Structures are given as structure tokens and as C-alpha cells.
Amino acid sequence: MRITETERRVLRDEAQKAFGADSKVFLFGSRADDARRGGDIDLLVETGKTGHDAIFEAQLRFLARVKLALGERKIDVLVDYPDRKDRPNILRLARSQGVQL
Amino acid sequence: MISTNSDVDALRFSDAWQECCTHLVHAKYALKSMDAFLPLDGQKLSSLDLESIQDIDQLVYRYSKLQDSMGSKLFPALLKVLMEPLEESPMLDKLNKLEKLGVLPSVQRWQKIREIRNKFAHDYPEGDEMKAAVLNAACSGIEEMAEVLARVGKAGGV
């Protein structure tokens, strides 16, 4: 896993504040791979929160607060939530290779 | 006539201001055209006609342009006009200063407005439900940017 301890803590704490205490964050993609360098921070958030507008608002809040705390980073967030209808393959991939923060 | 640095700064500010106002006019017009089907949901979004989709495209385009011009041109130009020496500082310092000056209601809120634009610019493919949620957020984002724009105008003496 190629993120700092501070980044890990901020990402996890802010995800729980925005998406609820029961939410889980996984790091996947190049940052989860020790053998690679640089790259975006790809995250999967699993939450029990529902409602598409509420999920998007939580996502905005999460990204805004993380960037205020850590400075500008390139972060992509996938959110898996109970009433999500489309299930692209990347969700499954992210879950299987992701490292929980 | 010899133009001074402050003339140049004032000109730059008024150009940026004009540019933002133009984007806002078009964004508001798009918003008005979308009135009949707001707020959106996945179902509505998937059954819109071509003209309505063009209205949405126009909103997305103007939202992005407006947010970008405000952040990259108007805010720095305002700080220069107000003689705030933050030219070389990170964006976040500039935003904090603007919050202190009362131009931005909150830095966090501006960061969210910016994230909506990022969402338009890239990211994973999303279903219609999430696309609708993003567009709904953008519609309120336009109103908030209009409010900030008015405050910038006041602070810059337009």
C-alpha cells in the first residue's frame, strides 16, 4: 500500500464521517500495489447509506474535506450502496483487489 | 498615457468578471429550460428528448467554465486588486483569504462546487441515478456561484 499513515487515517475517518460509521474504505489500483509508482488514489467506499442524492452529497463532503486536510490530490471514489442499480465490473474488481484502510 | 500595474490589475479583474457573468447568463438560461424536469432522477434522465439533453449539456459546459474561470482567473484577480500578496500561494491559501474577506461563505462549500466540476471532467462511468444526482447538485451549485459572483463584484467595486 503506497499511501502515508496520515493519508490512510484522514481517508478512513472522513469516509466514516461522510458515509456513516459503518462504512468501509478500500484502496485499489496502482496505489494498492507496492511495485508501482505514483498514480491516482482509487477508493471504493461501501456504505449502508441509501438515496442517490444523499450518496453524492456524502461523496462531495468526503472529497472536499480530504482535500482541505491533505492538499490537492487526484482521488477517484467509487461508492457501493444498497440501492445502487448499475453494477459495473470495476466494483467487483475493486472489492477483490482492494486493501481496507 | 503610462499605464500602471494597478491599471493592468483592474483591467484583468474586469475582464475576468465579464467572462464569468457571461457564463452565468448561459448557465441560468439552461437552468430555466430545465425547469420542467427538475429535480432529476434516473428514470426521468433516461427518457429525456434530444432538446432537453442539449439543455443539460449546456448547463454542464457553463458550470465547468464558470467554476474554472472563477477559481483560476477571477479570484486571483480580485486578490490582486485588493492588494493581497498571495500570488505565489497555493489555491487553498487564496480560498481561506477569500473566506476571511467574506467573499466565500465557506472554503469547504467552494471545494464541493469544485468537486462537482471534477465529477463532470472524469471519473468512473456511473448509472443514470448517480448522473441525475450530480446534475441536481450542479443546479444548486449554479445558484451558489451566482451568490459568490455577486459578492466578488461588491468586493472588487464593479
Image: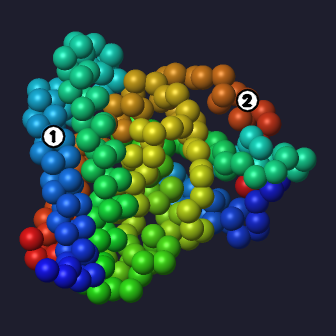
For the C terminus of chain A, the quadrant is bottom right
Whole-Å distance between the Cαs marked 1 and 2?
41 Å
Residue A13 lies in what quarter of the image? bottom right
On residue B87, the disc is none
Q: Which residue is mark 1?
A: B26
Quarter of the view holding residue A79: top right
Residue drawn at 20 percent across, 79 percent down: B3
**Measured along the vertical axis of the image, is residue A87 above or below residue B121?**
above
B122 shown above or below B66? above
Indicate the secondary structure of the residue bearing disc 2.
helix
Q: Nearer the viewer, mark 1 or mark 2?
A: 1
Label 1 secondary element? helix
> Residue A99, percent across and down?
78, 47
| Direction front: furthest residue | B1
Of residue B106 and residue B146, the one placed in the foreground of this image is B146
Residue at 66 percent of width and 28 percent of height? A90
Disc 1 residue type (three-letter): His
Residue A98 lies, in percent from the top left, at 76, 41
Residues packed near mark 1 inside 10 Å, few (<14), some (14 to 19) or many (20 plus) = some
Q: Which mark is residue A93?
A: 2
User: What chain is tagged by disc 2?
Assistant: A
**Type of residue at label 2?**
Leu
Measured as percent of width and height from the top left, residue A52 is found at 40, 36
